[in-house]
Every structure is written in C-alpha cells, then in structure tokens.
Image (cartoon, grey):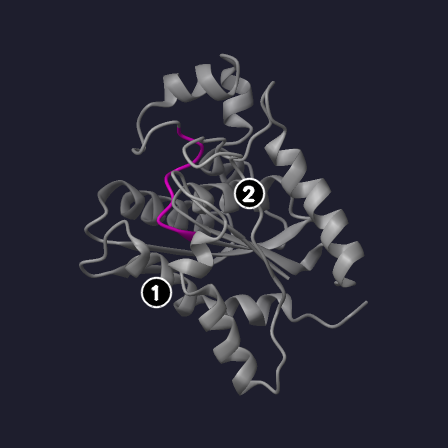
Amino acid sequence: MIVLLHGTPGRPVDWVDSGGAADVADAWAAQHHGVAPILVMPDVNGTYTADSECVDTPTAKVETYLTRDVPRVVSRLFGTRPPGPAWAVAGLSEGGSCAVMLALRHPTVFATFGDYAGLLGPRVGDSNGGVPDTVAELFGGSQAAFAAHDPATLLAANRAPGIAGWFEAGDADTDPAAAARTLSAVATRAGVENRLVIVPGGGHDFDLFSQALADSYPWLVGRVSVPAP
C-alpha cells in the first residue's frame, strides 16, 4: 500500500493528471504479472488552495484523518495488509513534508516515506523560514507542538524505529534541496536508512515530481512487499 499526498495549491488527482502515478504503477504491474501495490490519494487540504501541512488544527483533524480514518477505510474496502511495514506514504512539495512527518510520528502506520521536494517540515509558506508564522497559524502559538511535528527534532530524538525514507529534489529548487540534504544527513546520524537524490537542473514542478516517483517506486515496492503476517 502506497499513500500519495498532493501539494498546495493542488488536488489528489494531480498525481494522475500530471504526476504519472498511474503510468508508473501500470508499467510495474505489466512487468510483474499484474502485481503492484494499491495507490491511495487522499485529499489533505479540502480545497485547492488550503494548506493544512497534514496536522490537526481546531478546524481540521488532518493528521488523525490520514493515520486513523484512511487506514481503517482502505483496509476494510481493499483487504490490505495491516498498516505498518506494508504501508508507505509519499508526497510532492507540501505532501513530501507531510510524508516525513507522518512516518516519524506514526511508524506503526507508515514504515516508509518518500519526500519529493518537501521543506524541512510543516511551513505555512514556500520556504524553510517562517517558523514563527507556522507556530502561530498551525499550532496555536505552541512551540512544543511545532517541535513535536518537526522532522529534524524527531530524528534527533531517535523517533524513527524501523522506518526508511527517500529524499529527492532538484538542485534548482533551493529550499527543498537544502531540506533534503539536511534531513538526509540527520536521518543518517539517527541510523535511519535513507536515499538522497538531487536532480541536476530540477525545479519545483511535475517534471521533478513524476521523476521522483518513478525513481523511488521500485524501492518503495520493495519496502512494502513484506510477507503477510
């Protein structure tokens, strides 16, 4: 099972219309006797321009939705293996930041993440700065709540039992590339298996996002294709 998260502005269908998700999955299935992971693309924002950063706020419990509601419904409808080692979460831009955060905070739900051009963590803007605004808007002014969702802080505290991740960004996409390098290094120090890919000339666009999914897909499949319990 692979959960794919979109960015902002954006919609879940972006992964199919522009991100090449169906083509990547179909090509894999064609080469492996029709067998491929289920792809699920939930809506993380509710509207095209909203920016939840996948956290719980007074107006929307997005983290709860993604880590409780989505797994429960998907497992019931499709008879998947239970959340955990057989589940991965990956995303583009905002969705990439979400994927890292969700896996670190909920390793019993997602044991694998893919971060395609995400920032250092939850941010209300499009740069690695803006932490005060993020703390105020998403966490009610609580620095402790922000830290509890900050990937670098979680990794430094060794909050990553058994998870692994893939970081990919373009070197022309300054802040996401810096975030990928930083988080990969912190993850390595924390003993977290991870892959880092920096694409020469890559920007913050669907050329990069679709390439990142295609690059990481065989690795993701290998991670989620665990023996049934």
Q: To which residue does mark 1 refer?
A: 211
Q: Residue at x 55, y 43 (%)?
A: 43
Amino acid at pointer 2: Asp
The disc placed on residue 228 is none
Q: Residue at x 55, y 21 (%)?
A: 145
In the picture shown, does residue 129 fall above or below 209?
A: above
In the picture shown, does residue 7 fall above or below 209?
A: above
- Dot 1 lies on which element? helix
Q: 146 or 64: nearer the eye?
A: 64
In the picture shown, does residue 40 fall above or below 177?
A: below
Q: Magenta stretch?
A: 115-123
Amino acid at pointer 1: Gln
Q: To which residue does mark 2 refer?
A: 43
**Does the magenta segment cover residue 120?**
yes
Q: 84 or 12: nearer the eye?
A: 12
In the picture shown, does residue 116 fall above or below 32?
A: above
Q: As drawn, is 29 to the left or to the right of 27?
A: right
Q: Residues within 10 Å of mark 2 (few under 14, many from 20)?
A: many
Main secondary structure found in the magenta portion: loop
Q: Does any portion of residue 187 appear in the rendered image?
A: yes
Q: Residues within 10 Å of mark 1 (few under 14, many from 20)?
A: some
Q: 132 or 125: nearer the eye?
A: 125
Q: As drawn, is 130 to the left or to the right of 63?
A: left
Q: Does any portion of residue 82 appear in the rendered image?
A: no
**Does the magenta segment cover residue 136?**
no
Q: Dividing the image into 4 quarters, which one contains the C terminus?
A: bottom right
